[in-house]
Image (tube, rainbow, N blue to C red):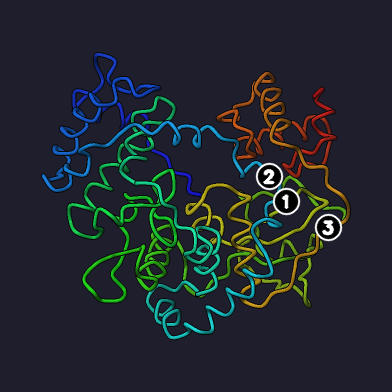
Amino acid sequence: MRNFKLAAAALAALLAASGMAHAGAACGDSAKGFDGFIKQFKKEAAAAGVGAKGLSALDGVQYQPGIIKKDRAQSVFSLSFMDFQKRMVSAYRIKEGANILRQNKQMFDAIQRQYGVPGEVLIAFWAFETDFGKNMGDFDTISSLATLSWDCRRPDKFREQLIGALKLYENGDLEREDMRGAWAGEIGHTQFLPKEYLETAVDFDGDGHRNLRRSVPDAMASGAALLVKHGWQANQPWIEEVKITKDLPWDQADIAIQHPRSQWVKWGVKGVEGKLKADNFPASLLLPMGKDGPAFLAYDNFTTAYLKWNESLVYSTTAAYLATRIAGAGPFDPGRGTVNALSYQQIIELQKILVSKGYDVGDVDGKLGKATREAVKQEQLKIGWPADSYPTVEFLQKLGG
């Protein structure tokens, strides 16, 4: 479930240095040319420090058309927050998460002392990524990454990951049979991409290996280490459910905008249980379904660490919410009324309309990403609608969709 990016300019330089940017060898959309790509990629990997053992993992690797089909599939991240959380936050996951936290208190306390990340945060990610280790995936990591590295759609996102996977095998962190996981190359209980595995994973159980497939302590502590790398601050909150009024400066409800909690209190934002602290602690107002849906205050741990773990707002909001449920919070208030959320195809239609109006929405991909939400906000301001950055069916109709 991870999203990750590499600068295209960096890839171009890498390809040029390795001799891969000529003779049409940069990418391909079928098995044709794949063997030649692997031959060239071995040279690139060797130049990046991969030795004979690591390079041997590429021997006999075959192009996997099934991986490409999965890469082209409609994304679950196009679901609304309400629909996504119904799928991901089950009574079983809340109860099992709390049981795991209680039964492994010593381990999670030790991780929190070292990294400052609460166990419920890590367990919620674990639930989302692999259902507590039950579904880590059985795709061959090297074959998957090699196929995606050759494919023309997003080769820049996978070639560095492939080198990372080869180095993991080279240095003995994983045996070849353990290099299995999700279709896009993620490995282990918390689905680390090979590069972040290589750079961030820790040996928390002290056996001399960083095995995120076979060792739960290694996986949980590595998840904490990655969150710290992403900016996690110890002893600080991540999200907090709040109640909002019917009249707010809706254009301020944006995860890119922070105000002191005292300002939110002045604007009528209240805590779910008792008063909201009217202090100078900075927070953003997160409205995952717009002004008529549920409401949360989002803190720096959410806007930095969570959104770097997964840049999908619907994923991160739901994972953060599950963590609060495991910690003992109740279910959220669905809001003031029915929100007519857009379907995947309607989001595509909306993005095309926004592009035609001159907005940069990034990829037209059916996901309500940061750029699309910002364009929606600007258009809402233009037409005099509450600028909560959330497009509904009614908003699409207003734009002529």
Q: Residue drawn at (54%, 64%), measured in percent from left and top?
A: 127
Q: Amino acid at mark 3?
A: Gly
Q: Which mark is residue 243?
A: none
Nearer-the-camera pick, 147 or 20: 147
Residue 29 in the image: state x and y as whole percent: 40, 22
Total residue callouts:
3
**From the viewer's perspective, is residue 31 above or below residue 297?**
above
Mark 2: which amino acid? Leu
Disc 1 is placed on an element classified as helix
- Seen from the viewer's position, the closer of residues 217 and 360 is 217
Quarter of image, res 241: bottom right
Query: On the image, numbered disc 3 is attached to which residue?
Result: 335
Disc 2 on helix, strand or loop?
Answer: loop
Give the quarter of the image for residue 158.
top left
Task: Identify the residue position indicated by label 2 in the image.
Answer: 79
| Mark 1 residue type | Asp
**Is 272 positioned to the left or the right of 361 in the image?**
right
Residue located at (50% from left, 32% from top)? 69
Question: x, y (%) of residue 269?
Answer: 78, 63
Choose between 362 and 89: the one closer to the eye: 89
Circle 2/circle 1 CB separation < 8 Å: yes
Q: CA distance from mark 2 to mark 1?
A: 6 Å
Badge 2: residue crowd in 10 Å (few <14, some 14–19, many ≥20) = many
Vertical arrangement, residue 90 with respect to residue 397, above or below: below
Give residue 272's position: percent from left, percent from top. Answer: 77, 71
Occupied quadrant, residue 144: top left
Pointer 2 with pointer 3, Cβ within 8 A = no
**Mark 1, residue position:** 83
Which of the two discs, 2 and 3, sits closer to the camera?
2
Image coords of residue 13 (percent x, y): 26, 28
